[in-house]
Image (cartoon, rainbow, N blue to C red):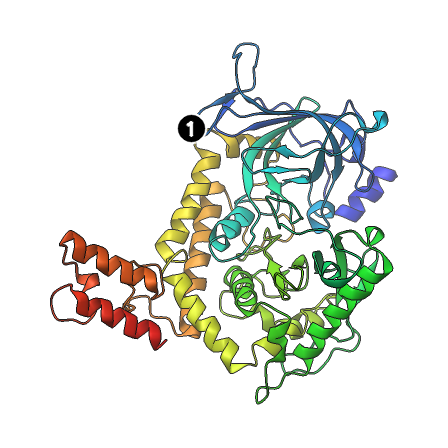
Amino acid sequence: MLVLAVLMLTGTARASSWWDNYAPDNKKVRLTSTNLPIVWISVGGQYIDSNERITARMKILHNGNGQLNYADTVSHPGQKIDYEGYVALRYRGSSSFSMSDKKPYSFRPLTAPLEAGGEKKKVNILGMGKDNNWALLAPYADKSMMRDLLTFELARPWMEYTPQGRYCELFLDGIYYGVYILSEVVSKGKHRIDLPDPGDSGDGLTGGYIMEVDRAEGVTHVSKYHPVSSKGSPYTNRYIYFQYKSPDYDELNSEQVKYIKNRIDQMESALWNYRPSGEATYEKYIDVTNFIDYQLAEEFSHNVDAYRLSGKFFKRRDSEDPRFKMVVWDMNLAYGNANYNEAWRTDTWMYKNNDIMYSAYETYLIPFWWYKLNSNPAYISALKKRWAQYRRSNLRQERVLAVVDSLANVITSHGAEQRNSQAWPRWGVWVWPNYHVASNYADEVAWLKQWITDRIAWMDSQLGFDPTAVLLGDVNGDGEVSIADVNAVMDMILMGRSESNGDVNGDGEVGIADVNAVLDIILNQ
């Protein structure tokens, strides 16, 4: 009867469950060699929990980029061990845990087993810098296995902090679990968001904090304001929740909690009271350029969770920067991957999606911030300009598609995707919440590339960007006109080169007049 009940609840027969740590369907996949790092985790048959961490042993083998890694370390001695030691391990994620057969993990390197008083230690893993807080993301609903890394790569030149991640292949208690992404998490640290712990008074009290717009789980701060419709009317039976991420709520004292609550209230009040004919006083509280970059990342990917879930933001001390800044995270359901809330479409704005989500009885809607920001003509003008800079640089269509091909090549060139599909045979099978059910990996990648192509074309049409137009004065091709272009023209003059992109004033030669032409463009922007 228990098995029948499980089948009725899930709608499918699961190959494994909690009692075998959610082992894959096929437990006999063999790995001989791979271009990806190999991660072994041993828990000795213990059950891995979602809340309490357990002690595990971890070993990461990585011989370096361009080198193969061999699972048989006896036949292939002398390979490079990137990390070997104890870790505190648990499952992580919300829907990525509950709705996926393949589970993600959180781990923290330890000085010794937890039972022996082991403490967290900072470790440099796969060249990503020393830290003590790591994740093993488990791409499952995202059958391309690249949506997170693709977003991180595209956003990195623009955002102050974007997480790093590395593909790897994972064994748990000797069983092959498939392709994972060993990733940084959004946290404080020298190699992450370099924030001090908050003090008790003065400037020290004003930073640093990491907060998150997310679900009403644990201790949260509830906004004084409600999400709004596409016409600005409040949905009074929906709420905005803020989670305390770093420090955790139980690590904050009453003054620190009071401060960060008040600061969020001040920011939201300034946004709520903004009118298009008035002053944008919210600029005192948010880094507008950062918010534009975050919006473009969420909109380009048409992320179904955009703005309302995993909406991580941080604040430094006032003496350094008094404004909140956003961080991109959790993009596995983006780029047309979700079949609800019209997220699969390429021709709508996600920030306007509250009406659709409210009609679908969604609990968590998009904060009103984004409605208010996009009602400001100056914000829209800056967003269009930023999109043009993106499109002339790292969001050139050919570059985006090349990044997709590059990521696909990493996980196909030495069989990692094939092994993952042997462990989790899901091609041609609908997995929540797929919109497109691909027949194989090549089909999935081709569909993703077409979706991106269509999305770029639509956003170009909406934001007034002509990809065939030349930006006068952009000599170095970075998508903007700046002092770097002056230097580029000077280099041409000094080297005796006369290139067409350096002839800014159109007189048929490259000379000091072109330097002056670029300077005029800069001064009049």
Position of residue 219 relative to residue 103, above or below, is below
Q: Is residue 56 left or right of residue 284?
A: right
Q: Residue furthest front?
A: 202
Q: Is residue 475 visible?
A: no
Position of residue 39 relative to residue 360, above or below, is above
Q: Is residue 368 left or right of residue 337?
A: right
Q: Position of residue 125 (x, y in %)?
A: 59, 33
Query: In the image, what residue occupies the spot 52% across and 17% down?
Result: 79
Q: Residue furthest bottom?
A: 277
Q: Position of residue 138 (x, y in %)?
A: 63, 40
Query: In the image, what residue occupies the spot 62% across and 50% down?
Result: 193
Q: Residue furthest right?
A: 1
Q: Position of residue 270 (x, y in %)?
A: 67, 78
Position of residue 439 relative to residue 217, above or below, is above
* Number of disc labels: 1
Q: Residue furthest left?
A: 508
Give amino acid for label 1: Gly
Q: Residue under circle 1?
A: 66
Q: Is residue 261 left or right of residue 83?
A: right
Disc 1 element: loop
- Circle 1 packing at 10 Å, graded few (<14), some (14-19), many (20+), is few
Viewer-proximal residue, 229 or 450?
A: 229
Q: Position of residue 491 (x, y in %)?
A: 22, 55
Query: In the image, what residue occupies the spot 37% across and 75% down?
Result: 525
Query: In the image, what residue occupies the spot 55% across and 64% down?
Result: 290
Q: Is residue 135 left or right of residue 302?
A: right
Viewer-proximal residue, 363 or 318?
A: 318
Image quadrant holding the N terminus, namely top right
Toward which corner of the image does residue 102 lie, by quadrant?
A: top right
Viewer-proximal residue, 469 or 454?
A: 469
